[in-house]
Amino acid sequence: MTTRRNFLKTLGGLTLLTVVPRSVLGGPKHIAPSDQLTKGIIGVGGIGRSSYHFTSDKACRLVAICDVDRNHLQSALEMGKKKFGETLQTYHDYRDLIRDVNVDVVHIATPPHWHALMAVEAAKAGKDIWCEKPMTRTIGEGKRVVEAVRRNGRIFRLNTWFRFTDTFYGLGTTVEPLKKLVDSGLLGWPLKVTISGATGFTWKFFWVGKENLKPEPVPAELDYDMWLGPAPWKPYNSHRVHQTFRGYWDYDGGGLTDMGQHYMDPVQYLLGKDNTSPVKIEVDAPQQHPDAVGIWHKIVYTYDDGCQIILEGEGFESPGKVPYIEGPLGKVYKGFECTIPKVMEKIAELPDPEPQNTDFIRCIHNRERFALNEENGHRSSTLVNLGACAVRLNRTLHFDPEKQLFIGDDAANRLIDQPMRTPWKI
C-alpha cells in the first residue's frame, strides 16, 4: 500500500532540488486523521526544549531540530534519544529544516527578530506553523506573515493560550466567565481594562538591557552572525544572546514584549477587538536608550469606541485595590470579585462563548483555522508593538487600524517596517 509517507521516501533525487508540499500529494484536505504528522523545532536553547514543546507522540512526531549554537543542538539531540529513543535530524541553518520534506509542521522558538522571516519561508514551503510569542518584532513583519499564510493556505498557531484555557495569571479565573460577562452588557460600555501588579500581572522588568556593552570573543560553539540574522550587526557580548536577548530593541522589547501578548491577547478577545487596533497610544516612561530596553511606567491604549487597555508598570506595584475591568455599570476585581450583585448566578444563565478550535493537530488535518491564528495573533502582537513604539519614541502616537500606519508621524512609521541586514529580507 502506498502511503503519503512512503511516497515521500521515493522522491529521494527530487528532494535534493525542491520541496514537495502536501498540496502536490493530494491536498491537505485528504490527510487521514490517522496519518501521523511530523514537526521540526527551530531554536532549542530555551522554550523549544521545554517539556511542553519538546514532545513526540502518535499525533505528531518530532523528527528534526535546528539551532545555531552547537551546545544547544547537542543537548536537544541527547534529549531526543533519552525521551523518544530515536536520533533526530539536526540542522544548523533553519532553511534546511524548512526544506526537509519529512517535516510537516515548523515550530519557531527563536528570538522574535527571526519569527517573521522563518514563518514566511515556512508558509512558502507548504509547512504549517507553530510560532512562539510575540508573533513578530514589528507591525510590518506581522503583516507579511498574515499575507504569506493566507496566500499559501497554511495553518498557523500562535503560542499563547489564555484566551481559551488555563487560569489567567494572577487574576484567579479563566477568561470564559469574563467573556460571558462582557458580552452580556451588564458592565456597560465602553470598558477599561487595567493590567497591573495590582490586578495580578507582573512585567518582568529584569528584562532590561545593559548600555555600552564591551565586545567579547564569540564562543566557538555559536554562529553569532547567523544568530543576528536580519538584526543590525553589533559586537558580540554574552548579554545580547540566549537568555538575556530580550533586553535589546534589535531582538525583542523587554518585559513588555515578553509578557505583553500573553496579557493582552485575552483582553483583545474579551473586548471583541480581534479585527482592529487602538487609535491612540499614550506613554509615561523615561527616555529609552537606542540599544538597551529600559523600564516604563504606564501605557494607555484607546480604541475609537472609547474602550481602553491600561498597562501599569514601574511605580504601580502597590497602588491598592484596582478593578481589572471597569464599566459604567460595574467593576470586576481579582478573583472575580464583582460589584454587580449575584453576578455568578447571572453568568450561569448566560450562553457560553462561541466554541473555539483549540486542537492544532485537528485543525491541520481538517484545514480549519486555529483559535489564535495569524490574523487575530497579528492584532494582539500589534498591541505589543504599538506600546514598544510609544516607549521608544516617548510620546503619544495616533494609529490608523485599517491602514495599520501611524498618523502624521514619520519616525513612528519607520518603526513599522524596519530594514533588515543584508542579505536578509522578506
Image: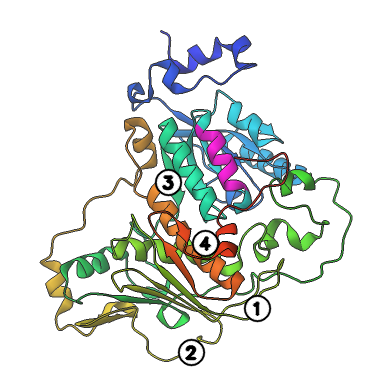
Q: Quadrant of the N terminus?
A: top left
Residue 378 located within the stretch drawn in magenta = no
Which one is earlier in the sequence, the residue at label 2 or at label 3? 2
Q: Quadrant of the C terminus?
A: top right
Which one is earlier in the sequence, the residue at label 4 or at label 1? 1
The stretch of residues the image draws in magenta is 114-123
The answer for how far apart the CA atoms under marks 4 and 2 are is 26 Å
Task: Tell me where residue 227 appears, x and y as whole percent.
Answer: 73, 47
Dot 4 falls on a residue whose secondary structure is helix
The answer for how far apart the CA atoms under marks 1 and 3 are is 32 Å
Dot 3 falls on a residue whose secondary structure is helix
Identify the residue position indicated by label 3 in the image. 374
Q: Marks 2 and 3: which is nearer the front?
A: 3
Identify the residue position indicated by label 1 in the image. 287
> Hey, what amino acid is under mark 2?
Ser
> Hey, what amino acid is under mark 3?
Glu
> Hey, what amino acid is under mark 4?
Asn
The answer for how far apart the CA atoms under marks 4 and 3 are is 15 Å
The answer for how far apart the CA atoms under marks 2 and 1 are is 24 Å
Q: Please say if 3 is above or below 77.
A: above
Q: Residue furthest left?
A: 349
